[in-house]
């Protein structure tokens, strides 16, 4: 404790040099916490939104289904398994059938993916309730559909608009009908929005002559036992979220590089300060040793001075960094409009998440790094001759 008090007194007496090191270290610490907190917040939001809007607790894929290969959609469909009917009846499963189509908005030709979904589901955030009043009204001269904000903006469609839709059924015959936009939803998940429209699955069965078939089935809860179905394969949420995890992992690698550079700059300043301190304070070191302090204690004293730099830096970072980080966590970080084209779940604002693990890990990194950097130049003290040190000469 005596050495610690002496280290604090020495640092306070150093004046501007101490505060310069403290400021640089605090900036590095706050940026480390901010950037990693932003990635953690994006990761949490992206996974939660993807589960809420698209994958639920997992999916069953029909044989040959590939969400990234639209040319296979017409062939990659299978009869819905019997156990799924009971789940769908209770609203715990949502069969989805996919068919390629073409829209003709305002005289243009736009390729579109038609997705039919079971309207009894309620665990996905898709507003399928908007379609229920039109499900069995076969006398209507239009097909009810819901679309996402991105499709609405790109095709310049709004609620109540009608547009011609053409598709090809299971026999290869082309047919066409009018689609009426009954609702436009706003989702952070582009994969349920971009380039697609949603209609009742019963209507799409009738249109495509493929009754009882589905391309994939969204499940409310994960399956404990993988079903023994030749035509279907179960994909859990870990598999379906792998793309997001890879992107976050890549971003975190760049975050680590930035944090390493900033921390290295701060530690370099601290290292130079300690080297200069050992060189300029030779008489003081000699006095300590002459008065009976062991070389080990003197080395510990100078090492503690470096550690106290980091403690002061953390306290200073809490003073100015906490309000700043709190402001970002409340108001979020606005994302550019181009983020919609990234193809992954990302909201208009990312809310950072500062977990205790992140904060304590950052604190540990700063403290341990400061200790190491402070100890390296302090080792030279162990080889000093007290007499020569009192004269200001190193051996």
Image: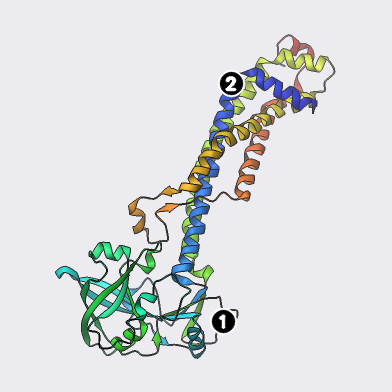
Percent x, y for residue 355? 59, 50
- How far apart, in angstroms, are the residues tagged by discs 1 and 2? 64 Å
Categorize mark 1 by other alpha carbons within 10 Å: few (<14), some (14-19), many (20+): few
Residue on which the image places disc 2: 17
Vertical placement of 188 versus 320: above or below?
below
Point out the image quarter for the C terminus: top right
Looking at the image, tell me whether mark 1 or mark 2 is earlier in sequence order.
2
Left or right of 251 in this view: 268: right
Toward the top, the furthest residue is 391
Looking at the figure, which quarter contains the N terminus?
A: top right
Q: Residue furthest left?
A: 107
* Front in this rendered view, residue 278 or 356: 356
Q: Residue at x 21, y 82 (%)?
A: 177
Mark 1, secondary structure of its residue: loop
Q: Which mark is residue 51?
A: none
Please give left or right for residue 147 compared with residue 269 in the image: left
Which picture quadrant has residue 62? Answer: bottom left
For image coordinates 69% across by 26% down, the residue present is 305
Instruction: Name the secondary structure under disc 2.
Output: helix
Disc 1 marks which residue?
Answer: 226
Residue 201 relative to residue 299: left or right: left
Residue at 69% across / 30% down in the picture?
Answer: 375
**x, y percentage for residue 24?**
54, 30
Residue 70, percent from left and from top: 33, 74
142 or 220: nearer the viewer: 142
Which one is in front, 133 or 245? 133
User: Residue extending furthest right?
Assistant: 292
Residue 297 spot, x, y in % from top left: 79, 26
Residue found at x 68% / y 31%: 307
């Amino acid at each position: 404790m005596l050495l610690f008090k002496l280290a604090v007194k020495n640092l306070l007496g150093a004046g501007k040099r101490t505060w310069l090191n403290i400021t640089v270290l605090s900036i590095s610490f706050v940026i480390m916490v901010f950037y990693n907190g932003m990635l953690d917040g994006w990761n949490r939001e992206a996974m939660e939104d993807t589960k809420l809007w698209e994958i639920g607790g997992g999916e069953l894929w029909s044989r040959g289904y590939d969400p990234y290969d639209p040319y296979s959609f017409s062939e990659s469909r299978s009869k819905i398994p019997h156990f799924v009917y009971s789940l769908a009846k209770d609203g715990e499963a949502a069969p989805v059938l996919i068919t390629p189509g073409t829209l003709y908005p305002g005289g243009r030709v736009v390729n579109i993916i038609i997705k039919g979904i079971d309207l009894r589901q309620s665990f996905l955030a898709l507003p399928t309730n908007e379609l229920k009043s039109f499900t069995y009204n076969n006398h209507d001269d239009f097909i009810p559909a819901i679309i996402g904000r991105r499709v609405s903006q790109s095709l310049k469609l709004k609620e109540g608009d009608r547009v011609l839709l053409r598709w090809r059924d299971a026999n290869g015959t082309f047919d066409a009908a009018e689609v009426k936009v009954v609702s436009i939803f706003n989702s952070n998940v582009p994969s349920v929005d971009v380039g697609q429209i949603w209609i009742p699955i019963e209507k799409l069965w009738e249109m495509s002559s493929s009754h009882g078939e589905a391309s994939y089935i969204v499940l409310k809860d994960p399956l404990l036992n993988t079903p023994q179905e030749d035509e279907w394969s179960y994909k859990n949420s870990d598999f379906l979220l792998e793309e997001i995890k890879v992107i976050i992992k890549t971003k975190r690698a760049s975050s680590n590089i930035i944090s390493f550079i900033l921390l290295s700059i701060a530690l370099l300043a601290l290292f130079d300060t300690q080297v200069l301190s050992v060189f300029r304070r030779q008489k003081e070191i000699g006095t300590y040793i002459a008065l009976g302090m062991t070389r080990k204690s003197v080395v510990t004293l100078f090492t503690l001075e470096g550690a106290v730099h980091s403690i002061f830096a953390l306290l200073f970072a809490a003073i100015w960094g906490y309000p700043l980080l709190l402001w970002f966590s409340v108001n979020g970080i606005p994302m550019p409009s181009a983020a919609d084209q990234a193809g992954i779940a990302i909201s208009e604002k990312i809310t950072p998440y500062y977990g205790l693990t992140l904060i304590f890990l950052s604190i540990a990194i700063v403290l341990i790094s400061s200790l190491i950097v402070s100890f390296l130049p302090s080792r030279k003290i162990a080889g000093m001759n007290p007499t020569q040190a009192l004269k200001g000469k190193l051996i």
